[in-house]
């Protein structure tokens, strides 16, 4: 009887030694590395255009929300004056000049924004885009934040 118990215990120990959860963790980490290696590389200019488009689209949506629901309170800032015409979407963004570096964390660029209006007409506006970057630490990990603000072109 003792031999039978020893055989069962040794079988359990050997069977549990190769836990499937450890194998899954290894496969998952290899997949993550593979995805990072195959990630497309985006130029800094394309990344900035994407961020600017998203920020302008956010302002357009806030204006539409306030127009449709006047009781909804949205914090107003200077960009509300810039995008006074309600449009559907941002069609294109062009940088008219090279990016001017003011300091390590602040850059300015003259930007032309093409809007697609509700009547399928194109509207253009020229603005100064201020890009402020900073580094923050969250739970021991360094992250880079980017804040984008707009102001009108002073002629």
Image (cartoon, grey):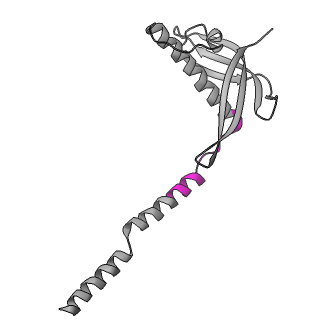
Q: Residue at x 76, y 33 (%)?
A: 105
Q: Which quarter shows the C terminus?
A: top right
- Give the x, y percent position of residue 97: 80, 24
- Give the x, y percent position of residue 53: 61, 25
Q: Which residues are magenta?
A: 31-45
Q: Most prominent secondary structure in the magenta stretch?
A: helix
Q: Quadrant of residue 145?
A: top right
Q: In this image, 13 relative to 124: left or right?
A: left
Please check the rendered image and state whether residue 40 is part of the magenta-colored stretch, yes or no: yes
Q: Quadrant of residue 126?
A: top right
Q: In this image, 124 relative to 10: left or right?
A: right
Q: In this image, 59 relative to 14: left or right?
A: right
- Give the x, y percent position of residue 50: 62, 30
Tell me if residue 150 can be seen: yes
Please check the rendered image and state whether residue 52 is part of the magenta-colored stretch, yes or no: no
Residue 82 vertical position relative to residue 109 in the rendered view, above or below: above
Residue 105 vertical position relative to residue 150 in the rendered view, above or below: below
Residue 95 vertical position relative to residue 28 in the rendered view, above or below: above
Q: Quadrant of residue 15?
A: bottom left
Q: Residue at x 60, y 15 (%)?
A: 115
User: Of residues 119 and 48, which is closer to you in this image?
Assistant: 48
Q: In this image, 54 relative to 105: left or right?
A: left
């Amino acid at each position: 009887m003792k031999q039978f118990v020893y055989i069962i215990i040794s079988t359990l120990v050997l069977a549990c030694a190769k836990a499937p959860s450890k194998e899954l963790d290894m496969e998952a980490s290899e997949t993550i590395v593979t995805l990072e290696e195959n990630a497309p590389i985006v130029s800094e200019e394309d990344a900035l255009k994407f961020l600017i488009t998203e920020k302008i689209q956010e302002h357009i949506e806030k204006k539409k929300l306030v127009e449709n629901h006047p009781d909804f309170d949205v914090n107003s800032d200077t960009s509300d004056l810039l995008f006074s015409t309600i449009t559907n979407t941002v069609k294109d963004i062009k940088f008219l000049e090279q990016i001017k570096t003011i300091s390590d964390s602040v850059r300015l660029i003259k930007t032309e924004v093409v809007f697609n209006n509700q009547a399928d007409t194109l509207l253009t506006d020229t603005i100064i885009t201020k890009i402020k970057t900073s580094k923050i630490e969250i739970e021991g990990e360094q992250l880079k934040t980017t804040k984008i603000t707009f102001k009108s072109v002073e002629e």
